[in-house]
Image (cartoon, rainbow, N blue to C red):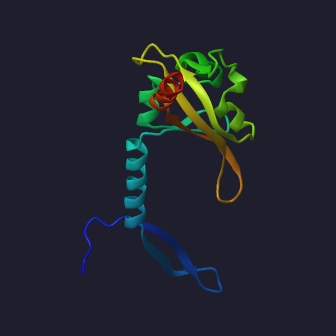
Amino acid sequence: EMKKNVLLSVFAAPFDNSTTEAEGALCLFYDITGEQEMKALFENVLENIEIAVTLVDSSGEMLLFNAAARRMLGVGPIDGQDHWSEGYGIYQFNGSPYSPDDLPLVRALKGEYIHDELLRIYNPEIDKQLILSVTAAPFVNPAGNFKGALCFGHDITDTTEAQKQVISS
């Protein structure tokens, strides 16, 4: 059966004899259509989940900033980790400002693992203050090489407010 719209990875090299003269060529074809479909599916999931996902390289440059991150933080990627606290309106849960070095994503760039740290977001670009539960970790590729940091944020504002109402009543 003949496939349509096949995406191929191709490797070609000369085929030499013992005198190093090229006698021909070897060409390998690998069907990566399914891999591209999986990549597209993964990208679609990242853009449509209700979890903020950010990925930065080892220098702190944003590589991934999904739609949920834009909604929760009120703006898109901001260059320079020294500007993240102010630009995104990130405060500690108790309301005090974060120093740029204490942000979960910055700490993950330094090799620290952060689990369920609570942040308050006071950004004028969004309608209300948000409470985010953030997990961040260094990003290491399958070969074990450090590549940057990954951060996930869950909006727990409604849950936190409901808990406060139950406690106060």
| Residue 60 can be seen, yes or no | no
Where does the image place residue 39, in percent across and percent down from the top left?
43, 56
Q: Nearer the viewer, residue 94 or 25?
A: 94
Q: What is the x, y in percent for residue 161? A: 48, 25
At a point 70% along the width and 37% down the height, the residue shown is 109
In this orientation, which residue lies closer to the viewer: 165 or 135?
A: 165
Query: On screen, 158 above or below 51?
Result: above
The front one of 103 and 149 is 103
Quadrant position of the N terminus in the picture: bottom left
Query: At x 41% / y 35%, what residue is drawn?
Result: 67
Q: Position of residue 92 (x, y in %)?
A: 64, 21
- In the image, farthest residue toward the bottom: 18
Q: Is residue 164 left or right of residue 2?
A: right
Residue reaching furthest to the front: 169
* Nearer to the camera, 67 or 33: 67
**Residue 165, placed above or below residue 111:** above
Residue beneath the point at 71% across and 33% down: 107
Residue 115 visible, this orientation: yes
Residue 126 percent across, percent down from the top left = 41, 19
Q: Quadrant of residue 71?
A: top left
How many numbered marks does the figure carry?
0
Q: Residue at x 62, y 22 (%)?
A: 93
In the figure, is residue 64 to the left or right of 96?
Answer: left
